[in-house]
Image: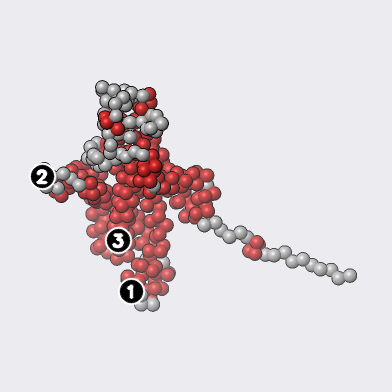
């Protein structure tokens, strides 16, 4: 009787394929929840005009002043909880009587536009400076290090407060109304002026270590130009670093923009903005605490979710640094 031997397949044949970064994020409950919240905010920002049209309200009209019985003589909502009703889901703004729900929706667009545009500019500047200086080394590296240390010595928030009105006064003629696009441009320029330095320093250190690696030396030995080495050899190896930077920079810029608007030097009327809504809520908090809750919770959720997503992205790109 013949005996048939069964040969077990080697371990490599049955070993599951390693998870990609996206799958690692989705398997992490905190990371997946943060991603869902961030996507929800992005979807709301994109669909804001459609939602406002279906809702039947806009962020500019003074509903409380135009319709009797909505605001008291002191400008506070007559109904409880800030005037929340079937017509005004999140209530009315004290004083002007604008709809809080549409103010929040358009405030998302304001914050995200400034944050993503500023993150794009800072990333471009950081890549250009950090990779170039890290690859060149020598005197360029020393000069850049000195310049970066000088800029980092300045108090960033104080400079943001000082530079924003100075730039606006230079770009707008005295007595002329400041266009809305200029408010956005000024904030993006102010954030870009200092936001690129940490990324450039990080990339400089990474590129300085990569330029001595065998694959870079091999490309040089084959006659590759410096541009080819930077674009084809170095940049692909810092893509994960750039992705982590963007996911961390966006919530920081959103929070900073809200602070500037809260202090009166960011986005001004009539553009909806979370920071200005929180500032107005602080003024009427004793009489109408509900008005401050909605922009405060929205800002907290967005910044927290984006920060948690940034942590999840970093851990997914380097699993050894996380808990997985």
Q: Residue 269, percent across and down?
A: 23, 39
Viewer-nearest of discs 3 and 2: 2
Disc 3 + disc 1, Cβ < 8 Å: no
Q: CA distance from mark 3 to mark 1?
A: 17 Å
**Placement of 83 over or under 156, stated as above or below:** above
Foreground of the two, 278 or 200: 278
**Placement of 294 over or under 116, stated as above or below:** above
Which mark is first along the chain, 1 or 3? 3
Point 26% across, 50% down: residue:
188
Q: CA distance from mark 3 to mark 2?
A: 36 Å
Point 38% across, 29% down: residue:
84
Neighbour class for label 1 at 10 Å: few (<14), some, many (≥20)?
Answer: few
Q: Residue 226, percent across and down?
A: 32, 71
Q: Look at mark 2 in the image and give the residue it sits on.
A: 174
Q: Residue 243, percent across and down?
A: 40, 55
Neighbour class for label 3 at 10 Å: few (<14), some, many (≥20)?
Answer: some
Foreground of the two, 265 or 94: 94
Q: Residue 239, percent across and down?
A: 40, 59
Disc 1 + disc 2, Cβ < 8 Å: no
Residue 76, visible in the rendered structure: no
Neighbour class for label 2 at 10 Å: few (<14), some, many (≥20)?
Answer: few
Report the residue that reaches farthest toward the left: 174
Instruction: Describe residue 175's horizontal placement relative to residue 124 as left or right.
Output: left
Q: Look at mark 3 in the image and give the residue it sits on.
A: 128
Point 39% across, 73% down: residue:
219
Which mark is first along the chain, 2 or 3? 3
Which mark is first along the chain, 2 or 1? 2
Q: Secondary structure at mark 2?
A: loop
Q: Look at mark 1 in the image and give the residue it sits on.
A: 225
Viewer-nearest of discs 1 and 2: 2
């Amino acid at each position: 009787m013949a005996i048939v031997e069964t040969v077990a397949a080697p371990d490599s044949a049955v070993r599951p394929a390693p998870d990609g970064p996206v799958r690692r994020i989705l398997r992490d409950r905190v990371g997946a929840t943060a991603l869902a919240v961030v996507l929800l905010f992005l979807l709301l920002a994109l669909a804001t005009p459609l939602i406002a049209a279906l809702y039947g309200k806009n962020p500019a009209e003074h509903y409380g002043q135009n319709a009797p019985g909505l605001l008291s003589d002191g400008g506070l909502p007559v109904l409880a909880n800030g005037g929340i009703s079937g017509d005004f889901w999140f209530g009315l703004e004290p004083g002007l009587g604008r709809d809080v729900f549409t103010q929040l929706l358009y405030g998302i667009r304001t914050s995200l536009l400034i944050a993503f545009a500023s993150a794009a500019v800072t990333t471009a500047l950081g890549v250009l400076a950090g990779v170039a200086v890290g690859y060149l080394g020598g005197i360029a590296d020393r000069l850049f290090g000195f310049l970066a240390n000088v800029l980092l010595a300045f108090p960033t928030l104080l400079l943001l407060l000082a530079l924003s009105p100075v730039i606006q006064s230079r770009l707008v003629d005295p007595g002329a109304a400041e266009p809305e696009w200029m408010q956005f441009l000024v904030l993006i320029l102010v954030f870009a002026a200092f936001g690129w330095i940490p990324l450039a320093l990080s990339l400089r250190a990474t590129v300085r270590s990569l330029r001595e690696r065998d694959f870079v030396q091999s490309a040089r030995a084959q006659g590759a130009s410096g541009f080819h080495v930077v674009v084809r050899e170095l940049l692909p190896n810092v893509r994960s670093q750039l992705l982590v930077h963007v996911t961390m920079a966006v919530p920081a810029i959103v929070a900073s923009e809200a602070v500037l608007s809260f202090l009166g030097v960011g986005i001004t009327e009539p553009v909806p903005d979370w920071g200005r809504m929180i500032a107005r809520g602080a003024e009427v908090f004793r009489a109408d605490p509900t008005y401050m809750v909605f922009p405060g919770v929205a800002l907290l959720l967005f910044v927290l979710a984006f920060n948690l997503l940034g942590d999840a992205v970093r851990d997914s790109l380097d699993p050894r640094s996380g808990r997985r």
